[in-house]
Image (cartoon, rainbow, N blue to C red):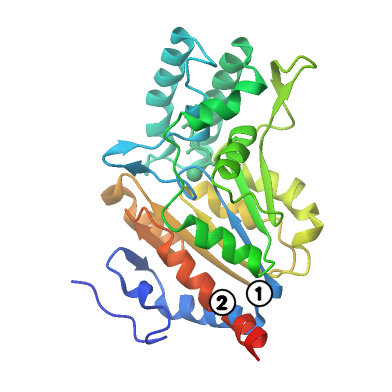
Amino acid sequence: MCSKTKLFPGQIPELAKCSVLMRDRSRVEDTIYAMQRAGAGRLQVISDFDMTLTRFAHNGKRVPTTHNILDHRLLIDEDCSKKIRELLNTYYPIEIDAGRTAEDKLPLMVEWWTQVHELLIQQRIRKELLAQAVKESSAMLREGYKVFFDRLTEQQVPLLIFSAGVGDVLEEVIRQNNVFHPNVHIISNYMDFDQTGVLRAFKGQLIHTFNKREGALSHASGLRVLQGRPNVLLLGDSLGDLTMADGVSEHQNILTIGFLNDQMDERKELYVKSFDVVLVKDETMEVPNAILKYITSSTDNKLDA
Ligand code: TMP
Ligand code: MG
């Protein structure tokens, strides 16, 4: 049985769903209320991409991450595909292991990403083929994604997508879903192509799941569009995603929402301790959309007045 929320009767009924867990319901409600009073003009949204904005699974099958979208015969050969899958089978269980600390996982994540990127570079991937690989993949954004992206655009709220995936693939996924709006900003691992359009390296410092804090401090903090927006709605599916707002100076209210996609029983306690709102096995954007609608509702009223 799940208990019903007492506050916001009728305003955010989605928070009463059985799949929503909160360590401190009244803190969540106070934060949402404070963010609503400050309005859309003071808000920024920072979100992870793979398995946060994209679905974890669909019809019982895993939805590919941006790295896994590259597992297409147009781009890589069978041997490379096999090696990348073996690496995934070795390192993904470590990434989500509730029994290991982030410090423990960090060097192993560097190993994983470095090996995959080296394998991809060896394949001499051609830039012009990325769009087709995305089109033919089973990549899927979460149900309700359009409402999410469109609302943020309408309200002129910047959305920072902070991803340890592959930026070029990520951009193509949101472009093909018609939501690559001007308020969307991306920090990710971008491919470096030579003059003939062949992959030769990855640009900048590697981003993996457990070093997002460094990226937040070095890149996000410098983004001018995010300045003067001390209220943050943060969305992620990994504990490492919680550091994505570490570059926000003089923040006032931060509400963190965590999608718990996998290893539910093992990780539930840790997630509830770490995120303000935990969404258990929820493949939709229903709850973030409801919170966002409420926070930005004062702007609606002003526009209506
Ligand atoms: P995210 O920061 O956008 O969630 O992207 C990182 C995810 O990508 C992380 O959960 C692990 C996953 N990943 C793969 O699926 N395959 C890979 O080869 C690598 C390196 C990462
Ligand atoms: Mg993720």
- Label 1 secondary element: helix
Q: If the image is split into quadrants, where does the N terminus sit?
A: bottom left
* Quarter occupied by residue 203: top right
Amino acid on which disc 1 is placed = Ala
**Is 27 or 281 nearer to us in this picture?**
281
**Tag 2: Cα neighbours inside 10 Å, few (<14), some, or many (≥20)?**
many
Q: Which mark is residue 71?
A: none
Separation of marks 1 and 2 at Cα, in angstroms: 7 Å
| Image coords of residue 264 (percent x, y) | 29, 50
Residue 73 position in % (x across, y down): 47, 15
Q: Which numbered circle lies on residue 40?
A: 1
Q: Position of residue 151 (x, y in %)?
A: 58, 66
- Tell me whether the residue at label 1 lies in contact with that at label 2, contact meaning CB atoms closer than 8 angstroms: yes
Q: Residue furthest left?
A: 1
The residue closer to the viewer here, 67 or 143, is: 143
Residue count near mark 1 (Cα–Cα under 10 Å), binned few <14, some 14–19, many ≥20 = many
User: Looking at the picture, how far across and down is residue 200, in whole percent?
Assistant: 71, 16
Q: Which residue is depicted at the point 60% across and 37% down?
A: 172
Q: Earlier in the sequence, mark 1 or mark 2?
A: 1
Where does label 2 land, which residue?
295
79 relative to 170, above or below:
above
Q: Is residue 276 visible?
A: no
Q: Is residue 209 above or below residue 250?
A: above
The quarter holding residue 94 reads top left
Q: In this view of the protein, can residue 61 be seen by the observer? A: yes
Q: Is mark 2 within 8 Å of ligand 2?
A: no
Q: Is mark 1 within 8 Å of ligand 1?
A: no
| Residue 224 as seen in the image, left or right of residue 135 | right
